[in-house]
Amino acid sequence: MMPFTDVIPLDIHDVKLVRPPKFRDDRGVFCEIYNRDALSAGGISVDFVQDNCSLSLSAGTVRGLHFQANPKAQAKLVTVLRGRVHDVVVDCRVGSPTYGQHAVIELSSEEWEPLCVPIGFAHGFCSLEADTVVHYKVSAPYDREYEGGILWNDPDLKIAWPVAPEQVILSDKDKQLPRLRHLAALFSYTGT
């Protein structure tokens, strides 16, 4: 087994960046971006059941802020396979000491560092390059009945996005998402 060298908590400690070892030679780079045993040793014990990919054709594309509610809630392991993203995670767990706070990190295909987003968080990103490909491992299959989200530019969240509102590329569905203050209490903080 090739252990991950680091599992690093972000500003919101339940959100973790995984830094797997990279092996370089004349051909390029080899890296395990997912290894269940290594993640578990780093404190991430999630049973991932589905893999998804998105392609953002243009820089300035925002996807999110999305989640899936209980009983179909999803943890995510997010990896950029091509390009770069400004990745954002918002704590939606009522009672959490970091409720309503967000963590931001740049993910890139140069680093191949997965981000673990636990259940109870809204997740989104802004593509920083054209033709950006993002891979997601999720812990529950997609279910339209339980999908939800928060408005990407909710003023209460004060997220510093790298794109102006008049230049953002956003789906019609994401334009209609509610602000966090109007969101039902879908997730509770368990203290772990």
Image (cartoon, grey):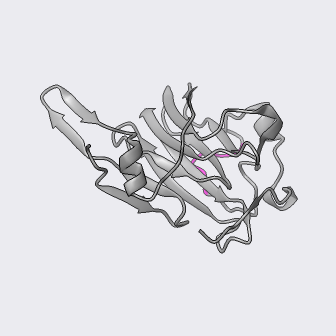
| Main secondary structure type of the part rendered in magenta | loop
- Residue 158 visible in the picture: yes
Quarter of the figure with the C terminus: bottom right
Q: Position of residue 161 (x, y in %)?
A: 60, 51
Q: Residue 52: horizontal and vertical position, in percent?
A: 57, 29
In the image, 8: left or right of 151?
left
Residue 51 percent coordinates (x, y) = 54, 30
Identify the residue at image location x=37%, y=56%.
Answer: 41
Residue at the extreme bottom of the image, as rendered:
97
Q: Nearer the viewer, residue 5 or 91?
A: 5
Image-quadrant location for residue 157: bottom right
Task: From the viewer's perspective, tell me whether residue 148 is left or right of residue 110.
Answer: right
- Name of the residue lying farthest toward the left: 26
Looking at the image, residue 28 sits to the left or right of residue 190; the answer is: left
Q: Nearer the viewer, residue 159 or 55?
A: 55
- Depicted 103 relative to depicted 126: above or below: below
Residue 130 visible in the shown view: no
In the picture provided, is 49 more to the left or to the right than 79? right
Magenta-colored stretch includes residue 184: no
Residue at screen point 38% across, 47% down:
37
| Residue in the foreground of this view, choosing between 28 and 97 | 97
Residue 142, given in percent of the width and then of the height, sits at 70, 32
Q: What range is drawn magenta here?
A: 160-165
The N terminus sits in image quarter: top left
Report the front residue among 187 and 176. 187
> Which residue sits at x=41%, y=41%?
108
